[in-house]
Image (cartoon, rainbow, N blue to C red):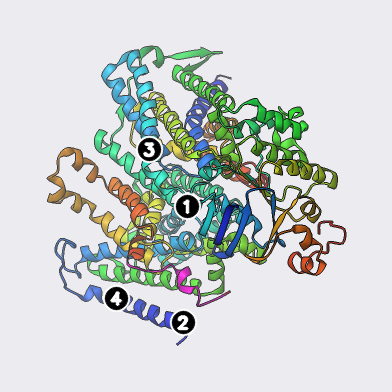
Amino acid sequence: MTTVILLTATGLGLAALYFLVASGLSLIFGLMDVLNFAHGAFVSVGGYVGWTVADHLSGTIGLFGALLAGIAAGAAIAAGTELAVIRPLYGRPLDQVLATVGLGLAIPALLQAIWGADSRTWLVPGWLAGTVDIAGARVPSVRFLLIGIAVALLVGLRLLLGRTRAGLIVRAGVEDRAMVTALGIDVRRANSAVFALGGAAAGLAGVLYGLYQGSVSPGDGTSLLIFAFVVVVLGGAGSITGTALAAVAVGLVQQYADYASASLGDESVVILLAAVLLLRRRNLQGRPA
Amino acid sequence: MSRVAKLWRTHWLRALIVFALLYFLPYSTLSIPGVFDGPLDAPGVLQLLAVCLVFAGLAISYDLLFGHTGVMSFGHGIFVTGGMYVTTILVNHAGYALLPSAAIALVVSLAASLILGGVALRVGGIGFAMVTLAFGQAVSILVISGSPQLTGGEQGQTLNGSAVPAALDGVRNTANLYWIALAYLVVCALAVWGLAASTPGRVMRAIHENERRVEVLGLNPYLFKLLAFALAAVLAAGGGIIYLLLLGGATPSVSTSNFTLSLLVMVVLGGAGRRWGAIVGGLVYGYASQSLTRLSGASAISGLPGVLRGPLQQPLFLLGAAFVLIVFFAPGGLAGRFGAKTITDEYRGGLRS
Amino acid sequence: MSLLEVSDVRVSLGGSAILHGVTFDVADSGVTALLGRNGVGKTTTAKAILGLHASSGSIRFDGRELIGLPTYAIARLGIGYVPEDRGVFSALTVAENLRLAEPRGRGSAAYDRVYELFPVLRQRATQAAGTLSGGEQQMLAIGRILLRPNRLLVVDEPTKGLSPKVAAEVARALKEVARTVPILLIEQNLGVVRTMAGRAVVLDTGRVAHRAENTRDLLADPALTNQLLGVSTANGVSP
């Protein structure tokens, strides 16, 4: 029983990370048709900036400072990317993807140049470093922080999408961007907002991943990115609920499969992806193929 | 002379000249200081050039998918890995001779490509890209941590020296390895150019331009894409085998997503869909990636203030930044900058469907 | 007086040329019908006007060149678009669809007018637009665009796939709208065209094949109608 609880808790913790990264990716892809290969770099930027703040301030203040700094850094670099790289290439979707590939290689290398290739240890504040006892299982507290923040993001995003005009534009744009422009709405502002929001969530994920692992390294974002892509494909582009469910599925499958046999975890995710794509006779947007 | 015949003549003549030059290169004692560490016939230089040639062949195989048929695969490294590792494992652990092992590796890679392609191509562009990415990741993990005794894990595995024929063994035979690499490049070039001139190749170009129209014509794009995928995979596996011979062992670096991305970079750098584009890109990238330590130590860079020096000494930073610049300022790649047309444009007006 | 002047517009899609130089005018009142067989380029023309396809040539709206402008800017100049596939956002509710179109600070008078024309929209306000019937979706598409300050409406096959009764309802509503806003109407249903249209422009393989000052005269000539549109107009029923 304790194993089940531990596996589930870890799986949900990973799911939280995947959701944080994938939610932004999903909206960006759904609205802008851009496969943002630089998204992993946003995660790493958030992680390193957050780490630097935590390193200087230390303790619980450092933690909160890191969270805020990570969010801000992620949002900033994402906004900058959208403005300088994505927007000028409007109408050239393949070139946009290729440019993000280039950024996805260059930015982590830049981080490596600044902070070094070795991972930096993240000293988690005492109250967070412990475990919580659930029915005999000792679950690391960090897991709950991850899950809590992810749930908060999920609720926040649903409110944003469901109750605001900006959210209305994004929901409509994910379905039919051309029609939105035909209604006189300049979708580019929604594009920038979605990119920045995605970057903020990614930066946040970077900080939390650092806490989760107890360290940051330049390749962190990239390893999360691949799983985030799988989650986006499974959950359906532009659907926040779908992304959340897919993240949970991937996180749990990965943990349970890993328990059955080491390294089976990642392969099982791949098999899950292939199986779902084959069985699902719809295109990515959820409409019949 | 008809347009097609003219195309044929200029093109094949040019190819003949280039390959002949490359063939005679190891006989030359020409020295190009700054570019190469020694005269052209020095083993170190030949080794570097041989790797460039293999990369060029790999790049062509990738361009067949990406530039020609319009299929963006992130799993091309899987087949390079297959060629490299299956051969190594059979030689080292099962005691087979080199040639049979290589042959089996090619067959295994072909089978794997039919399975992976068969499954992945059933879904549209983005789904396909993601499936190949995910499978590539799975293979990489398999190679690195799956069964280290078999694969050599993170370190890779040297190829059993006794299995390598004497003609390829040893530093003084580097020229032979160079010629084998050249032979590989020529095979790839002929295969892809030949396919481009054939009817299936024409269909693949049409799929790239407008898949729906191909469907409307009653053809099944899925089968042609699968054909391209399989052929590209076999060529890639061949490249993996040649690369294995050049390095003397298997390395897990070919299984990483970065390696497949570097193939994409080679193609875009050189010019996607252009006859010589991928070759140029492979050669340039091969040279740059192997000479980076030398280039980054160059006085021009080490003299810069730390803020600039740090990033410039990171190969991936240079690569990524160059990539972004290419996309912005030279979307047709190097070949495009020099006026090379895409193969589609070459044939347009010559071979009407 | 011409509100919209289309001159020598050429559009290529996916490597093939669709429009080979289309030239016609749309007057600033009444309905101008854009007719032609399937596949001649009517929808492509509509999309070119809205900037949804890259085109060469010239499209002047009230003297202002449209080619090169982004679609949202063209829409803001007062051109309202009801596409062939209706363009209704199926995941959004009817009310949300309407709200999306409504520019800031527009009073409820516009809403009143829309609900007057299409009472069903008020009934189904909280329903997801994807669950509406074809006719209701068409009404939503039209009603939605009417919330905007339009100086010209481009409407693409509004009665396509609708039962005769519902098609008549939609046609009636459009006729009512046409009293205050000029419409460029693409239609294959000649019965609808006959009741609504003033002028007609007929396309054939990407070019203008015929212009008629009075649509009724065109439709009254069976030989001409058959040649241009490939239908008999014996009782005005669509092909």
Which of the chains bears the disc numbered 3?
A
Residues at marks 3 and 2 touching, judged by CB atoms closer than 8 Å: no
Magenta region, residue range: B338-352
Residue B236 can be seen in this image = no
Looking at the rendered structure, the kind of residue marked 4 is: Tyr
Looking at the rendered structure, the kind of residue marked 2 is: Arg
Marks 3/1 same chain: no
**Image vertical order of residue B187 relative to residue A250, above or below:** below
Q: Residues within 10 Å of mark 4 (few under 14, many from 20)?
A: some
Please tell me whether mark 4 or mark 3 is closer to you in this view: 3
Looking at the rendered structure, the kind of residue marked 1 is: Gly
Q: Which mark is residue C68?
A: 1
Q: Which mark is residue A41?
A: 3
Q: CA distance from mark 4 to mark 3?
A: 43 Å
Q: Residues within 10 Å of mark 3 (few under 14, many from 20)?
A: many
Q: CA distance from mark 2 to mark 4?
A: 30 Å
